[in-house]
Image (cartoon, rainbow, N blue to C red):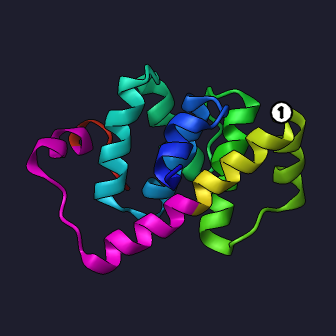
Amino acid sequence: METGLYIRHGSRLDPRLRELAILQVGYFVGNHYQFAHHVEIAISLGVPEQDIRAIAEETEGRKSHLEPLARSALSAAREMTSSVSLCQETFDALRAGLDNECLVDLLFAIATYNSIVRILASLEVDLEDEYRPLLDRFPLR
């Protein structure tokens, strides 16, 4: 199965948790294309707007309303994006909340989207006009 299809349709990982982590990667690096496209996906999956907005709070070091597992997934995305690996505390928190398969799938999704944002940035892929309103609703820093 293709990587993207597995991440979105083959994994048992909770789609909300997956999308929050993917959004965190795009938000953290400021990639308009990836972030806006996954905001649309998250909304289509029923992820509350408040959860999407919490990414900015968590990135700025403020504790949001998100439950501990979601906050740990966002931490994992930031850590893997900025320093490649996870600190032990983040890994332990994820391990406590996810079985082995879902833990690997979360880390795989984060790593995959770290690759994708780098390709998008290197190719200078422009965001389509129809996605720009999503950036007005959910601005990047």
* Residue at the limit of the structure toward the bottom, as seen here: 122
Q: Main secondary structure of the magenta part?
A: helix
Q: How many marks?
A: 1
**Picture quadrant of residue 31:** bottom left
Residue extent of the magenta highlight: 112-135
- Where 94 falls versus 64 (above or below)? below
Residue placed at 42% from the left, 32% from the top? 42
Instruction: State which quadrant residue 62 falls in.
Output: top right
Badge 1 crowding class, 10 Å Cα cut-off, few under 14, some 14 to 19, many 20 or more, is some
Residue annotated with mark 1: 97
Residue that protrudes farthest toward the front in the picture = 1
Q: Can I make out residue 57 in this image?
A: no
Q: Residue at x 31, y 45 (%)?
A: 37
Confirm whether the magenta stretch covers residue 128.
Answer: yes
Could you say which is closer to the camera, residue 107 or residue 80?
Answer: 107
Residue at far left of view:
129
Residue at 84% x, 52% y: name it: 91
Q: Is residue 19 above or below residue 114?
A: above
Q: Position of residue 34 (x, y in %)?
A: 35, 54
Q: Say which amino acid is labelled 1.
A: Gly
**Foreground pick, 65 / 125:** 125
Residue 102 point in image, percent of width and height: 74, 39
Q: Residue at x 18, y 64 (%)?
A: 126
Q: Which quadrant of the figure contains the C terminus?
A: bottom left
In the rendered structure, the answer to whether residue 78 lies left or right of residue 72 reads: left
Q: Residue 78 appears at what percent x and percent y?
A: 62, 59
Q: In the rendered image of this protein, does residue 84 appear above or below residue 9?
A: below
Q: Is 50 placed left or right of 14 in the picture?
A: left
Residue 101 lies, in percent from the top left, at 79, 41
Residue 70, visible in the rendered structure: yes
**Which quadrant of the view contains residue 38?**
top left
Q: Secondary structure at mark 1?
A: helix
